[in-house]
Amino acid sequence: MISFDEAVDLTLAEARPLGAETIPLPEAAGRTTAAAVIALDDSPRSPVSSMDGYAVRAADVTSAPVRLRMIGQSFPGAGFEGTVGPGQAVRIFTGGPVPAGADRVVIQEVVRREGDEAVLDALPGGPAYVRPKGSDFRAGEVLLEAGRRLDPRAMVAAGAADRAEIEVMRQPRVVVMGTGDELVEPGSAHLTRYGIPESVSHGVAALAGVWGGVCVGRLRLTDDLALLKAAARRALETADVAVVTGGASVGDRDFARAMFEDCGLQLVFSTVGIKPGKPTWMGRAMGRLVVGLPGNPTSALVTARLFLAPLISGLAGGRPEDALAWRTMRLATGLPATGDRETFYRGRRTADGVEPFSDQDSGSQKTLAMADLLIRRGANTPALAAGEEVGTLDF
């Protein structure tokens, strides 16, 4: 059995990017850039108006009143092709190209129209309301560095770069296998005498998606070793990461590791000195990663957050360390002394700090849904009172 920090170090060593691929821009949201995104053109491509008004020559509005003859209109995407000469004006709208000859925009609120003339009864004042060519960025400028997650803001920049396709890191494909004779599909458990809804794989698959993976299979398997071995091989032929929940103890029907033995399983680590989650393990088989999680829902999700999240993040091209960004918070209520294993409590944010839940049972699912933080405490540490500081991780 190894410590939590040792298990994290081994996990991070496995969390290496899987490679790059080029995909259409609309499919790139949430992915990580594999190369810098470089603008193909200036933005704006020509001077444009930042207000609705009239494009004029600044030299024509140095005194008032003044009358300017209207010679056309400029809309976004449909500019005026002529040239503004002395005593002339072009009606312009926000985002419309400023025509040749004009060097300022007079906002419409200070202009009076009389037929085909624009009349200014007073000097317009204010700025020129013109966004110069390339004032946002220039052609060839790097808008997004490699390694940037394509969040909504980054997607705007990628589109602005005029890129139809983006080179991104490949998403790790994940297969999640829930094991146990007692497990049945949600919706049918209440129709059986002993069946339990198989809930864990749904949460693990969702967590993999949050951290950059894509679930390509979710299986519910009985404790039949031959069936499990066949499912393990199929998973390794399909996925980059095979996750198996349950079957990690030493009972007669705990086959989580045995199911991968014929595939050449080599362990990275076997058990971790933490609570919950001691049976968590990681290995490699057929060149793929295998992660074993406990079968109890809370234990499975806590350990998935601690180990699977940084693993998936790193494989997807992110910084795996960012998935383990601990920060200090004050306790809203106290915590008891810990035992001989490092302990991770479920808690939630409150106005007074982080509040640990009273129910820390590894099978609890209602409390799990309410938790938004994990609280880390070392082994054999004394009780803490409200107001003392603890390390927390977004859950």
Image (spheres, rainbow, N blue to C red):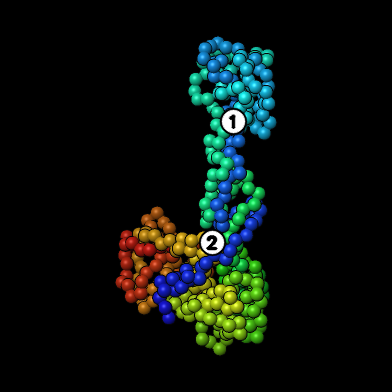
Residue drawn at x 59%, y 22% as measured from the top left: 102
The local crowd at label 2, few if under 14, some if 14 to 19, many if 20 or more residues have their Cα within 10 Å, is many
Q: Which amino acid, by three-letter code, is at mark 2?
A: Gly
The local crowd at label 1, few if under 14, some if 14 to 19, many if 20 or more residues have their Cα within 10 Å, is many
- As helix, strand or loop, the secondary structure at mark 2 comes to loop
Kindly report the distance in space between the C-alpha atoms of the residues bearing marks 1 and 2: 38 Å
Whole-percent x, y for residue 96 in the image: 63, 30
Foreground of the two, 81 or 48: 81
Instruction: Provide the residue designation for mark 1.
Output: 48
Quadrant for the N terminus in the image? bottom left
Name the side, left or right, on which 244 lies relative to 24: left
Q: Which amino acid, by three-letter code, is at mark 1?
A: Val
Foreground of the two, 253 or 259: 259
Residue drawn at x 32%, y 60% as measured from the top left: 387
Residue 129, label in figure = none
Instruction: Provide the residue designation for mark 2.
Output: 317
Residue drawn at x 49%, y 20% as measured from the top left: 125
Foreground of the two, 5 or 342: 5
331 up-or-down from 151: above or below: below
**Is any atom of residue 264 visible in this view?**
yes
Whole-percent x, y for residue 198 in the image: 61, 73
159 up-or-down from 88: above or below: below
Which of the 4 quarters of the picture holds residue 177? bottom right
- Residue at the extreme top of the image, as rendered: 65
Whole-percent x, y for residue 204 in the image: 56, 68
Whole-percent x, y for residue 7 in the image: 44, 74
Which of the 4 quarters of the picture holds residue 92? top right
**Is any atom of residue 279 visible in this view?**
no
